[in-house]
C-alpha cells in the first residue's frame, strides 16, 4: 500500500483505488446465517428463484467494503471518524466467486471549524465486480487528519 493520504492531499475530483476481494461462498454463507438469514442469502433454491442464484447480504458487501478501505490511501492513519453514509445503493447482486474492487472519488472537502487539525471530506465509494459493474455505492463523509496533525500525533 502507498503512503496514507490526509486532508491536505485530497481535492474534489481526485479518484483513488483500494484493493480487491474474492467472495468466498462458505464465508458469505456463514456471515448470512448469523447476521442476515434471508432465504436469498442462505438458500440456493430461494436465491435462484429470485435472482438466478444465491446472493450476498448487503451487510456482507458493506463489511467487504470496510475491509478494502483499510487497503486504500485514505485509511485508518488519516480517518478520525465517519459521520455517516448517504445514497447507499446495492445495484447488482454479489455472488460467490465475484471479485470486488474498491474505487473512491472525492466530491467535496472543507476545513473543520471546530477541529483545526482536521477537515471534512465527502467521497463516493463504489465496489465493482470483475466485469466492471458497480454493485454497491454510497457517499461517506469523514473527518480526516491534516498531515501536520499526524506528524504531531494530535487529535486536538
Image (tube, rainbow, N blue to C red):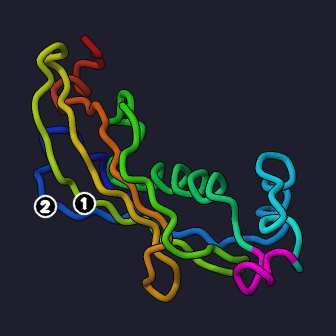
Residue 60 percent coordinates (x, y): 66, 56
Q: Nearer the viewer, residue 89 or 5?
A: 89
Dot 2: element: loop
The image's mark for residue 13 is 2
Q: Nearer the viewer, residue 102 or 91?
A: 91
- Single out the residue that lies furthest toward the front: 50
With respect to residue 36, does 115 lie above or below? above
**The magenta stretch spans which residues?**
46-54
**What residue lies at 31% left-to-right and 60% top-to-bottom?**
104
Q: Earlier in the sequence, mark 1 or mark 2?
A: 2
**What residue lies at 13% left-to-right and 61% top-to-bottom?**
13
**What residue lies at 36% left-to-right and 58% top-to-bottom?**
125
Magenta residues: mostly which secondary structure? helix
In the image, taking residue 19 as reference, residue 36 lies left or right, namely right
The answer to whether the residues at label 1 and label 2 have Cβ atoms under 8 Å apart is: yes
With respect to residue 61, does 75 lie above or below? above
How many C-alpha atoms fall within 10 Å of the one at disc 1: few (<14), some, or many (≥20)? some
Quadrant, the N terminus: bottom left
Residue 105 percent coordinates (x, y): 24, 60
Dot 1: element: strand
Q: Quadrant of residue 55?
A: bottom right
Q: Quadrant of residue 77?
A: top left
Residue 89 percent coordinates (x, y): 46, 60
- State how far apart marks 1 and 2 are (Cα): 6 Å
In the image, taking residue 102 as reference, residue 38 lies left or right, namely right
Q: Tell me, yes or no, whether the highlighted magenta stretch contains residue 48.
A: yes
**What residue lies at 78% left-to-right and 65% top-to-bottom?**
41
Quadrant, the C terminus: top left
In the image, taking residue 149 as reference, residue 137 lies left or right, namely right
Q: Tell me, yes or no, whether the highlighted magenta stretch contains residue 45.
A: no
Residue 114 percent coordinates (x, y): 17, 13
Residue at the spot of label 1: 105
Amino acid at each position: 500500500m502507498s503512503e496514507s493520504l490526509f486532508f491536505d492531499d485530497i481535492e474534489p475530483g481526485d479518484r483513488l483505488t483500494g484493493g480487491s476481494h474474492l467472495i468466498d461462498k462458505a464465508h458469505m454463507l456463514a456471515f448470512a446465517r448469523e447476521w442476515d438469514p434471508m432465504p436469498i442469502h442462505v438458500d440456493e433454491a430461494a436465491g435462484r428463484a429470485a435472482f438466478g442464484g444465491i446472493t450476498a447480504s448487503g451487510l456482507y458487501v458493506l463489511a467487504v467494503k470496510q475491509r478494502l478501505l483499510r487497503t486504500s490511501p485514505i485509511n485508518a492513519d488519516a480517518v478520525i471518524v465517519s459521520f455517516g453514509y448517504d445514497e447507499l445503493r446495492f445495484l447488482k447482486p454479489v455472488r460467490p466467486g465475484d471479485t470486488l474492487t474498491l474505487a473512491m472519488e472525492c466530491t467535496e472537502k472543507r476545513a473543520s471549524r471546530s477541529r483545526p487539525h482536521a477537515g471534512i471530506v465527502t467521497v463516493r465509494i463504489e465496489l465493482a465486480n470483475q466485469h466492471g459493474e458497480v454493485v454497491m455505492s454510497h457517499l461517506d463523509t469523514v473527518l480526516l487528519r491534516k498531515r501536520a496533525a499526524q506528524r504531531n500525533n494530535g487529535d486536538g
